[in-house]
Image (tube, grey):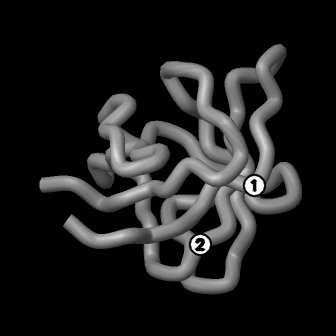
Amino acid sequence: MFKVGTVSHYYDKLGVAIVELNNTLSVGDKVKFVRDGEDLFEQVVESMQVEHKKLDSASSGDVIGLRVNETVKAGTEVFKAG
């Protein structure tokens, strides 16, 4: 498991987390959300966007919108699992 990014914002009405990536992330990857050392939840990346364009993958330095299954707070770390 390694870190792929950090949540900078969460839009609760949309269920979308804004994630600043420091590694590559692709649709189909399994990710884990961790806050203050506590595992929150895992999910498979089903949809991601950069500036309202759907992408299959994004790289380090990209800021993506990621649809999430549960509420996350800014500062939550995102790890690639599996």
Q: Residue at x 44, y 70 (%)?
A: 4
Tell me, yes or no, if residue 54 can be seen here. no
Q: Amino acid at mark 2?
A: Leu
Above or below, 19 against 68 in this view is below
Above or below, 14 against 48 in this view is above
Residue 14 coordinates in the image, percent (x, y):
78, 22
Name of the residue lying farthest toward the top: 13
Q: Residue at x 47, y 45 (%)?
A: 35
Q: CA distance from mark 1 to mark 2?
A: 10 Å
- Judge left or right: residue 54 versus residue 70: right
Judge depth for marks 1 and 2 and give the one in front.
Answer: 1
Tell me, yes or no, if residue 46 can be seen here. yes
**Residue receiving disc 2:** 21
- Judge left or right: residue 21 versus residue 13: left
Disc sitting over residue 8 in the figure: 1
Front residue of 54/39: it is: 39
Q: Splitting the image into 4 quarters, where does residue 11 fall?
A: top right
- Judge left or right: residue 57 versus residue 8: left
Q: Residue at x 28, y 47 (%)?
A: 30
Front residue of 32/28: it is: 32
Say few, some or many: other residues with alpha carbon within 10 Å of mark 1 (under 14 / 14 to 19 / 20 or more). Answer: some
Q: Splitting the image into 4 quarters, where does residue 8 fall?
A: bottom right
Mark 1 residue element: strand
